[in-house]
């Protein structure tokens, strides 16, 4: 699923409000939580509280997964840190 997500991010064809507005003019292109234009880049940078919490939870899960799958402890720590920053 990550490869699919990454491909959509790189091709700028994610299921965002901006993309949906191409097919349905009733979409206002804005993210419901922060009311800013939602595009591919915005998905990872939105300051909305729900998305910030989701992002933090995903990084915690990533760290645990790396640690429990015997990735070197330094990498298990720094990969999620690098992604989050």
Image (cartoon, rainbow, N blue to C red):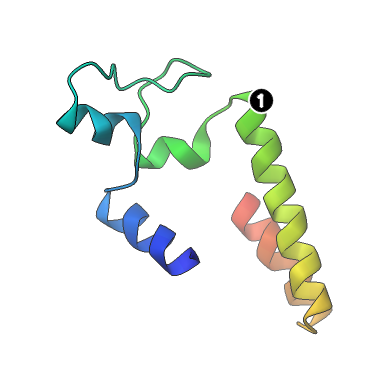
Q: Residue at x 17, y 19 (%)?
A: 25
Residue 39 in view? yes
Judge by depth and name the residue closer to the eye, 52 or 15: 15
Q: Residue at x 72, y 66 (%)?
A: 78
Q: Against 66, is 29 above or below?
A: above
Position in image of residue 74 (x %, y %): 79, 75
Which quarter of the figure has residue 21? Answer: top left
Please state which of residues 4 and 84 is positioned toward the viewer in this rendering.
4
**Would you say residue 85 is visible in this rendering?**
no
Measured from the top left, where is residue 42 in percent x and y? 43, 35
Identify the residue at image location x=70%, y=57%. 81
Say which residue label 1 marks: 49
- Number of numbered discs on residues: 1
Residue 60 in the figure: left or right of residue 43: right
Report whether 64 appears left or right of 15: right
> Which percent across, then down, holds residue 14?
34, 46
Secondary element at image label 1:
helix
Q: Badge 1: how crowded within 10 Å, few (<14), some, or many (20+)?
A: few
Q: Position of residue 70 (x, y in %)?
A: 80, 84
Asked if 64 appears above or below 17 in the picture, the reply is below
In the image, taking residue 45 as reference, residue 48 lies left or right, namely right
């Amino acid at each position: 699923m990550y490869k699919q997500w990454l491909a959509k991010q790189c091709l700028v064809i994610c299921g965002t409000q901006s993309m949906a507005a191409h097919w349905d003019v009733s979409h206002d292109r804005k993210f419901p939580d922060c009311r800013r234009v939602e595009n591919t880049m915005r998905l990872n940078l939105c300051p909305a509280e729900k998305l910030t919490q989701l992002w933090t939870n995903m990084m915690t899960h990533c760290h645990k997964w790396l640690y429990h799958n015997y990735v070197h402890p330094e990498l298990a720590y720094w990969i999620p840190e690098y992604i989050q920053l």
